[in-house]
Amino acid sequence: MATILIKNVPEDLLKELKRLKVEMGCRTWAELLAKLIRSERVILLTEDDFENMREGVQSFLNLRGTVSERW
């Protein structure tokens, strides 16, 4: 199974994700991601949330590039 690392997640966003993890009965982060992807309910994001996610994705892509170069 693959592993992902996400850096620079703001503390308030991490708290919200932890709350969702408990609320949705997930034991692992992978389980939470799978449920969120398959979920049919609407998730509303603020512009700040969207920007934080964009920064997190960019950090992940930068990390992936660095790891690929050094591997």
Image: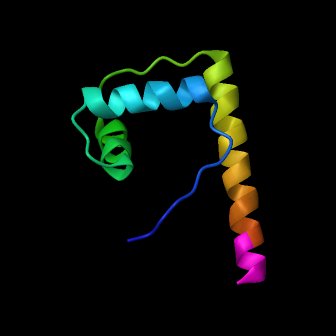
Image quadrant containing the C terminus: bottom right
From this view, report whether residue 45 is shown above or below residue 68: above
Magenta residues, as a range? Answer: 67-71
Residue under the image location 26 percent in, 41 percent down? 26
User: Residue 42: x and y, percent?
Assistant: 37, 20
Between residue 53 and residue 42, name the one nearer to us: 53
The number of numbered discs placed on residues in the rendered structure image is 0
Residue 44 shown left or right of residue 58 in the figure: left
| Residue 15 screen position, x and y as percent | 48, 26
- Looking at the rendered image, the quarter that the N terminus falls into is bottom left
Magenta stretch, main secondary structure, is helix
Which sits in the foreground, 50 or 28? Answer: 28
Residue 55: where, in percent of width, then height?
72, 39
What color scheme is it? rainbow
Is 6 above or below relative to 4? above
Left or right position of 59 against 13: right
Residue 13, picture quadrant: top right
**Rendered position, 71 above or below 21:** below
* Residue ranking furthest to the left: 25
Q: Is residue 70 magenta?
A: yes
Q: In the orientation shown, which residue stands out farthest toward the bottom? A: 71
Which residue is pictured at 72% across the width and 61% down the height?
63
The residue sitting at 70% across, 57% down in the picture is: 61
Q: Residue at x 62, y 37 (%)?
A: 9
| 45 relative to 71 in the view: left or right | left
Query: Is 32 above or below relative to 40?
Result: below
